[in-house]
Amino acid sequence: MALLIVGLIPLGLYMQDLPLSPQKLQLYSWHKWAGVTVFMLLWVRVAARLAWPPPPLPWQMSRWQQQAAHAGHLALYLLMLAIPLSGWLMSSAKGVQTVWFGILPIPDLIAKDKALGAQLAELHALLNWTLMAVLAAHVAAALKHHWIDRDNVLTRMLPSGAAPLPPERS
Ligand code: HEM
């Protein structure tokens, strides 16, 4: 999902400035297909998180750091929901139905409305800039845990499992 999302951002920024051409329309389709895929995968992700809750955060983290981490994770989930949804609503309002990978027609959520479509495009862009800010903080925090705090917050995401915590500092 991270790869899809991180790829969708530059694709979205690039495609919209292109002059109208078959290539532009193709890129729009790929963007929408990948975005709808993120929307579908989100539900698998939410189910997996409910079934296998993450381990507790390291005890060394202060209360405000733990609250900031939880708020950041909640923001990422909300944005993973709101961004594809705003794209889907925008496409519906612009009257361009999404046909997932050219096979599965995704129903339009609202009727065609050009003015609303333009507003939803602005909302889609705003949510994406918010995502970029939250992602930057998320990556910076993960690197801080790894290189400065030297705890297992980053390594525990690897398939090989969590690395042992460093010994308690006196
Ligand atoms: C996680 C999923 C998605 C991400 C990260 C994403 C990201 C972006 C970004 C960064 C832009 C450029 C915004 C700007 O600066 O104006 C954009 C534009 C756009 N996105 Fe998405 N998008 C996602 C999902 C979707 C979905 C599901 C759809 C439609 C079904 C969609 C349709 C569009 C369209 C039509 C534009 C061009 C808007 C215009 O021409 O004004 N996006 N997207």
Image: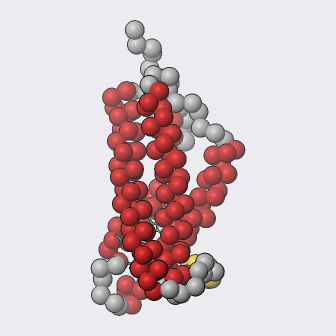
> Of 151 and 67, which appears nearest the observer?
67
Is there any visible trace of residue 35 in the rendered image? no
Percent of width and height locating residue 26: 43, 84
* Residue at the outermost right position: 51
Q: Which of the 4 image quadrants contains residue 141? A: top left
Name the outermost residue toward the bottom. 21
Residue drawn where x is 39% and y is 72% of the image:
122
Asked if residue 118 lies left or right of residue 111, the reply is left
Of 55 and 68, the residue lying toward us: 68
Whole-percent x, y for residue 80 in the image: 51, 58
Residue 162 makes an appearance in the image: yes
Please say if 34 is above or below 107.
above
- Say if 100 sits above or below 80 in the image: below
The quadrant in which residue 53 appears is top right
Relative to 38, does residue 154 appear above or below in the rendering? Answer: above
Determine the image quadrant of residue 101.
bottom right
Which residue corresponds to the image point at 39% horizontal and 90% vertical from the top-left? 22
Number of marks: 0
**Residue sitting at 35 percent across and 49 percent down?**
136
Above or below, comparing residue 141 to residue 31 in the picture: above
Q: Residue furthest top?
A: 170
Looking at the picture, tell me which residue is in the foreground, 49 or 125: 125
Residue 128 percent across, percent down from the top left: 40, 62
**Image location (x, y in percent) of residue 93:** 51, 82
169 on left or right of 103 = left
- Left or right, 126 with respect to 81, comes to left
Q: Tell me, what colour scheme is on the image?
A: secondary structure
- Quadrant location of the C terminus in the rendered image: top left
Ligand 1 quarter of the rendering: bottom left
- Residue drawn at (52%, 62%), measured in percent from left and top? 82
